[in-house]
Amino acid sequence: MDHNRAPLWEALQKHHSYTQANFHVPGHKAGQAFDQEGSLYFSSVLPFDLTEVGDLDDLHDPIGAIKEAQALAADAFGAGQTRFLVGGTTAGVLASILSICRPKDKIIVARHCHQSVFHGCFLAGATVIPIPYAVDPSSGLELPISPEDIDRLLIKHPEAKAVILTSPTYFGVVQRVREISKIVHRYQIPLIVDEAHGAHFGFHPQLPIPAIRDGADISIQSTHKMLPAMTMSSMLHAKEWIDMNQVDLYLKMIQSSSPSYPLMASLDLARRYMMTEGERQLSLVMERIHFFRKKLEKIKAVKEIKRQSTMDPFRLTIESSYYTGYKLAEALESKGVYAELSDERKVLLVFSVGTQLAELDILYQTLMDLHVDKQVAKSKNKPMLLIPREGEIIPYAECRTRERCFIPVKHAIGKRSATHLVPYPPGIPLVLMGERIHQEVIDYLLFLLTLGGKVRGLIEYQGDYWLYVYQEIE
Ligand SMILES: Cc1ncc(COP(=O)(O)O)c(C=O)c1O
């Protein structure tokens, strides 16, 4: 296939040069009317912010440029079939689950999946069977899921309709997809991998194998996160045997009927960029990161959290004995340096083909100049570590019909949460909707809030934190 081509981008350019008069949406009419100041910045993109006219094809029923662009993407990413997504990986995760699970079907889900996975299960009315996970106490990073745990759960729930994992995780932990897929396939069910953070895999021999080439049946990647594509643009990759009619049906329901052409074209262009320049650019940035990692060893105030060789090298997690993660991120921000996320202990830095040497120099200098206060080091709270307890979750089909009530957090212990309680970022629920609320989780979430963290699901009201719980029917 000719990866120098970008069929959707070409169709947009052709359309733009051929158009004489525009009597269709959007109302800015290819940028002819727009806020004057905004137009200074948006004017180069607006002519391509079009709709399904002429030869621009239709995402929901592609027969031309979009179909070709998706076929090129499937070839580039090693999939049998690929779909462009304009609602992020979230849209692909929701559609995958909805296409496979009917109400009350069981689905085996890694407990540390992103909230979008649990939202998909909720919408499908599926029953979540959580796969437990362990955390390495020294690094605070989650360990890869054990294939034996999945085997054990499949023996117990052979009627499960799918297994879903996150790989890599936010901090770059890659799952043993090949081994796990062999176990899952014994039950003739699909393995779905949320690969939101792994769209760059497969474009360099030193990077992990992408899930779809390693045994997964469906993988969903946030192209916008790790490749040069616009925010919200993602791809869903599937093996040939996946029934895409079902996936497409739900994508139609979940995504806009006016999908953004700049987003879709950015997917087409990201694929072309990676196929033509990706490996060279990844090598260059990997070299820069390697050099940066070496220099980081000399800095006293921070250190990199030890990583396994199988982890994604494009993620670097640092911690400091002088700062909580939140305070360290604040210190960086005060110098105009922005990290991907921070938590009570650590700060995550994410690199990509776009990372410039000059930015790494600024980061290095900022870390070198950090104020080191020995008193703080002594008094710094020991980071708490909390792994959700293994507990049974109310089937989501039942959750949807249960009454909810809004109560102060101190009265919620022992009740079942009617909302996910999610430290954000990274967006991994510590209490799932339908799970019992334990005192230690509430203590931990309140502790995060006192340190400046954010927790979705806890609402400040009348000087306290409140939340929604299900009314007990027992
Ligand atoms: C593991 C994981 N999956 C899915 C998502 C959702 O991706 P998107 O923002 O592309 O919808 C995220 C977002 O951060 C994520 O971290």
Image: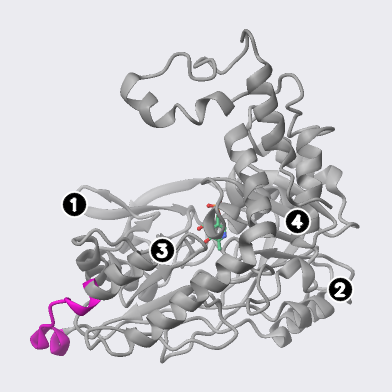
Q: Are marks 2 and 3 in contact (CB under 8 Å)?
A: no
Residue named by callout 2? 185
The quadrant in which the C terminus is found is bottom right
Residue named by callout 3? 356
Q: Quadrant of residue 221?
A: bottom right
Residue range (magenta): 366-379
Upstream in sequence: badge 3 or badge 1: 3
Q: What secondary structure is marked by label 2?
A: helix
Q: What secondary structure is marked by label 1?
A: loop
Please state which amino acid type lies under the numbered disc 4. Answer: His
Residue at the location (38% across, 61% down)?
Answer: 412
Residue named by callout 4? 237
Q: Is mark 1 within 8 Å of ligand 1?
A: no
Circle on res. 463: 1
Tell me the mark number nearer the camera, choosing from 4 and 2: 4
Upstream in sequence: badge 4 or badge 2: 2
Please state which amino acid type lies under the numbered disc 3. Answer: Gln
Instruction: Report, in whole angstroms, how far the alpha carbon at label 4 lies from the one at label 2.
Output: 18 Å
Residue at the location (59% across, 39% down)?
Answer: 263
Tell me the mark number nearer the camera, choosing from 3 and 4: 3
- Image position, residue 14 (x, y; %): 69, 26
Q: Is mark 3 within 8 Å of ligand 1?
A: no
Tell me the mark number nearer the camera, choosing from 3 and 1: 3
Q: Is residue 166 above or below residue 276?
A: below
Q: Quadrant of residue 188?
A: bottom right
- Image position, residue 156 (x, y; %): 78, 79
